[in-house]
Structures are given as C-alpha cells and as structure tokens.
Amino acid sequence: MNNKLVVVIIILLSVGIFAWLVDYGWKHRYGSPQTYALHSSPVLAVCYISEQLNLNSDVAADEVWQGLRGVEVNLHHQVTEQPWPKSVTPTVNVQAFHNGTDIYFKMTWQDDRPNSQVSLDSFVDGCAIAVPLDANAPPAAVMMGFTSLVNIWHWRADKDVEYWEKKEYVRPASADFTYPFEQEEILSVTTVPLQSAVADLVAQRAGSLTDKPVQAIQGRGAWSGGKWSVVFRRALATDDAQRDCQFPWGEHLAAFAVWDGDEGDRGGRKSMSEWVILRIEQSGQSKAAHTESIVEWAGSPAHTVNVQDGQQVAHATGLSSLSLLASAHASSGSGQPEQAEPEPRVVSIKAKRFEYIPNRIYVRQGQTVTLRMESLDVTHGLYLDGYGLDIKAKPGQVSKATFVADKRGRFTFRCSETCGEFHPYMIGFLEVTPNRRFHVFILAVCVTFVVMLGLLWRGSRQVKGIGENVGTH
C-alpha cells in the first residue's frame, strides 16, 4: 500500500477520534448524566368487613387477614437529625379494614430475633403509625410533625409483654433517683398503670411528643418465623377531634415506622415511610369487591428519568412509595419522552435554627442551578448576594429557585427571615469556579493530537528520504 495513503488514513482516524472526544467532553462538561427515580404514593383501600377482632387472642393469625392483600411500603432512615439507624428495615407490609365502628391495621416486617426487654445495652422492637390532624400536612412525612399536629400510635414489644402477658421484669433494687428508672428505686414512687401496649401520642414538631390524657388505641403483637405482626385497633371516630385523628369516608394520609432493637434503634433512630394514602370506603360494601385489587397507586405509575445530553426520557419502572428524591425532581405525568433544556443541577438545602445544611455549595461557572430549600422548624429565607436570589420556605414546605451561575467567585447567602436571636449568623457560601477539568481535558487532547501529527509527519519524511536514497543508488 502507498505510504501516503497510510498517512492519510491515520490522519483521518486521528481527526475523527479527536472530534469525538471534543463532542463527548462538551456534552459532559458538567459531569456524567444522572438517573432519578420518580415514584407515586401507594394507596391502601380500607374496605368494609363485618368482623370484630378480639385482641385477647392471636389476632395476627386471624383468618380475616388471609384473604386481604396489603401494601408493601418502602422504608428509609429518618432524615431530620442524627443518629441515623445503623441499618434500615427495607419494607413493612400493611393491611387494613374497618367494620363500620372500628378500624384495624396490621403491620408485618422481617426481624430475625424479637427484642422485648430494655436494658442499658439493649433496646426493644417497635412500630408506629402517624396520621396528620391537619388537612394541609407538609409534603414529606416526618413522624414528629411540622407545626401541624400529628397523632402517633406507638407500639413497643416490652409494653406488649407487660400489658397482655402481665409480666414485669424484676430488677435489682437501686436508688439512683434518675429517670427513667423510678420503678427500681428503694423509695416508694407512683407509676401510672399501663392502659395499653400502644402509646397514644400527639406531636407538633421534634421534641414535642406528648401522651394524650385519654388513651384511645389498643394493639397487640406476635413474633413468629422471623417476622413481627402487630395489629392496631381504634374507633373510626372519637370525642376528641382536636387530638385524635378521625376516619370519615374518603382519603387520609398515614406514615409507618419500625424500630429494630438489635440494630440499636430507639427514639428518633428508626426506619420510616413517606405518606401512604388511606382510602376508607363506606360501610356495606362487600369484601370480595376489594380483595382482588386492594393495592392501588395514586397518579401516574413510577418512572425512571434518565437525564442525558439535555434530554429527559421517562421509562416505566416498578411501583413504590414516594421518595424524597422524587419531590426534588418532578416530571410530566404523561410519562412520554420530551425534549427539554439541559437538566439543571439540583442542590437540596435544609434550613434550621441557625444553620444551612450544607452551608457551602460548589458549582461550575455557566451551570444552571436549582436551589431547593426545606425548612425544618420555622420560616427561613435564603438571599444570595451577587445574584439577587431570594427564597422563603415555611416549616415543612419546599421552595425552589433556578439561576445560571454566570459570575465567578465566592458569594454569601444568608437568612432573609428573622428566625431567632442568632438569625444574623445564619449564613452560607456559594463557590462558582471555572470547569478546569474540562479545560485540562481539551488541552490534553489537543497536545496529544499535535504530537501524533508530528510523529506522523516525521515518519513520512523518513520514509520519503529512504525512498530517494534507494532511487539514487
């Protein structure tokens, strides 16, 4: 083959590879494409069944649950504060029905070993149901509530043993006068008699968990074959509508939580769900009409959105509970591929007295950025110097703002709503830097291309010189 043809082919290949590298680098100049999972809230139909369960027996094994399908609810660690759980119970199966007077819930989850005794180095298993009392509940389920009251039913394995089996743990006598060990004191103390294995509580925010004066909920649990099954029973309607959740016909919200004592779960360290929609149906409807399809899903089916090369493509996936990530990246309900502008980088910020989490944000110059701020306690603001951006978020709500980071440098953002005595010190920083990695990449490709051309040119000169020498001889 002619040497000149070989050189031309090599040069064309080099130019093609160089053009592909430049195109790839330009499309990925803000990082690799990301995939966000978008899910819809599960809907649990609470159908009518003319059954009344006796909690004195093993209600978890009652035949009424055998033909009743449930919802598999996804769980995640609580996100409001540390410590987070060491491990997360992935799912809990929830079933429910009502008989026109009472409503029943059954929660079932995997647990290799039951823990029903609390001590200094061990904790008990438990579960809870939280129902908001305010119709305008925050979009994310937080078991302690945000400014609006939440009714919480908290079952614990140790209370179950004490209440139903009438067993009390005998501990050695002591006199440390330290809560919560009053029952161990030598001196006489007064203890409130246990009314149920489930604590009927109300809360308005983290740290405000309070026992209700009237305990209106009953429950009982049983562990068998590596699973806990807990049944809750309460009247559909009570006399205290201000502090008891009511269940008229229609849709309501509820969240579920699980504590695993083996993993050190206690207090705020738990696995919890997002809101699940309860659809309570009127009395008189037959059970058979609902056992075929108890599980429904609100809105459109879940989608996986692949953001790549400035396009947003939706793919149908399995159904699960609403994720926190889905609230940050909303897509169209049609589920069809659509052309859009390059997806902005979403930065989630949590605001609480008196700090932003995170308080330092790093972005590339020219990048489109969406700030998503959520308040965890009171109303907070975020004013970004240099860009004139101002966001305000009420407790439990999420506010968004999108801008182009076209100015290079370090910019301060501060709270623009008076939130307390240390409000002036609630600040953070935005660092806008050029994309040096992309520039280095382009420079390296150019240098490599020039070196390759130089080597090819030198090789062709040597071949030409050899050919002239041979012709001369």
Image (spheres, rainbow, N blue to C red):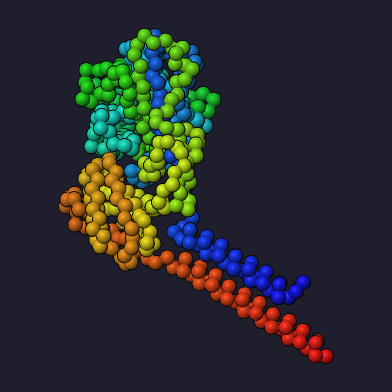
* Quarter of the image with the N terminus in it: bottom right
Q: In which quadrant of the rendered view does residue 191 lie?
A: top left
Q: Nearer the viewer, residue 169 or 37?
A: 37
Residue sitting at x 33%, y 38%:
140
Q: Is residue 208 visible?
A: no
Residue placed furthest toward the bottom: 473
Q: Nearer the viewer, residue 419 or 404?
A: 404
Relative placement, left or right, of 166 versus 180 is right
Q: In which quadrant of the rendered view does residue 428 lie?
A: bottom left
Q: Is residue 451 visible?
A: yes
* Quarter of the image with the C terminus in it: bottom right
Residue sitting at x 71%, y 75%:
4
| Count of numbered labels shown in the rendering | 0
Placement of 191 over or under 440, stated as above or below: above
Placement of 256 over or under 78, stated as above or below: above
Q: Nearer the viewer, residue 460 or 369?
A: 460
Residue sitting at x 38%, y 42%:
330
Residue 126, image x and y in percent? 40, 30
Residue 465, image x and y in percent? 73, 86
Residue 73, image x and y in percent? 44, 31
Residue 39, image x and y in percent? 43, 36
Residue sitting at x 52%, y 60%:
24
Residue placed furthest toward the right: 473
